[in-house]
Amino acid sequence: GQQVMQIPQYQHVQEGEDFTTYCNSSTTLSNIQWYKQRPGGHPVFLIQLVKSGEVKKQKRLTFQFGEAKKNSSLHITATQTTDVGTYFCAGQRGAQKLVFGQGTRLTINP
Amino acid sequence: EADIYQTPRYLVIGTGKKITLECSQTMGHDKMYWYQQDPGMELHLIHYSYGVNSTEKGDLSSESTVSRIRTEHFPLTLESARPSHTSQYLCASRPGPSNYGYTFGSGTRLTVV
């Protein structure tokens, strides 16, 4: 079945450093979504990427969808303590269910 | 603001009890989902529904059952709770078209003692 692998599992950075999490699918995806879950909270939808090679930005966050539509990345520039949480990617193939990655837990040293 | 509501927020029950976790959404979404998640870990899909009277099992084997009698309501029932059921249960919904993100509820943290 479809699998979505996300790395790294954990990432600890100093405040102000950049952060990147990567997502890889075993199959070509129709779209990929990214979610953020704060400690003790629930996942919150951030963005969806649909087109091959697509790049979207939300303030300090940059999301990319690979040319082959099998991988994606989320990059945070100059992290802040408010960025702490677990970031999940979720891939979809056609009308099938979303498949979530394992998540990358980001902690930040102020 | 969340338009998907889960109750109770926290629940501690004894082994063997029957429980129902409630999930309601006011957005008219066709698709609803139940996920099980241990703190900070990955999400495991246990049930989903694409509309009234439609329910399917997810990827994670679960001893729970669900029903979808009304669009807005998608309760999850455990007939006999066990300590292994201790976890967080998240309900989510989204509109019919596939190009929308999921809206998650705040979750129910279940502890079975």
Image (tube, rainbow, N blue to C red):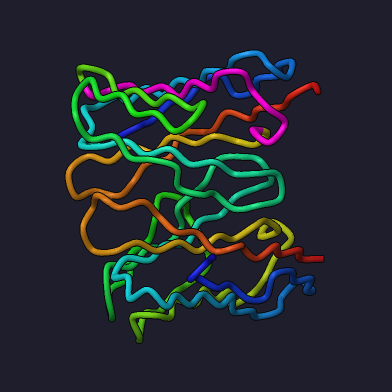
Looking at the rendered image, the quarter that the N terminus of chain B falls into is bottom right
Quarter occupied by residue B21: bottom right
Residue at 21% x, 58% y: name it. B97
- Residue nearer the viewer, B79 or A74: A74
What number of labels is visible? 0
Is the residue A102 above or below the residue A54 in the image? Answer: below
Image position, residue A18 (x, y; %)? 59, 14
Residue at 65% x, 20% y: name it. A11
Image position, residue B37 (x, y; %)? 60, 50
Q: Is residue B90 magenta?
A: no
- Residue nearer the viewer, B15 or A109: A109
Image position, residue A20 (x, y; %)? 52, 18
Residue A1 appears in the rendering: no
Residue at 44% x, 33% y: name it. A58
In the displayed orientation, state which residue is furthest to the front: A59
- Residue nearer the viewer, B36 or B82: B36
Image position, residue B77 (x, y; %)? 54, 76
Q: Is residue A75 magenta?
A: yes
Q: Which residues are magenta?
A: A69-83
Residue A83 appears in the rendering: yes
Residue at 71% x, 50% y: name it. A40
Looking at the rendered image, the quarter that the C terminus of chain B falls into is bottom right
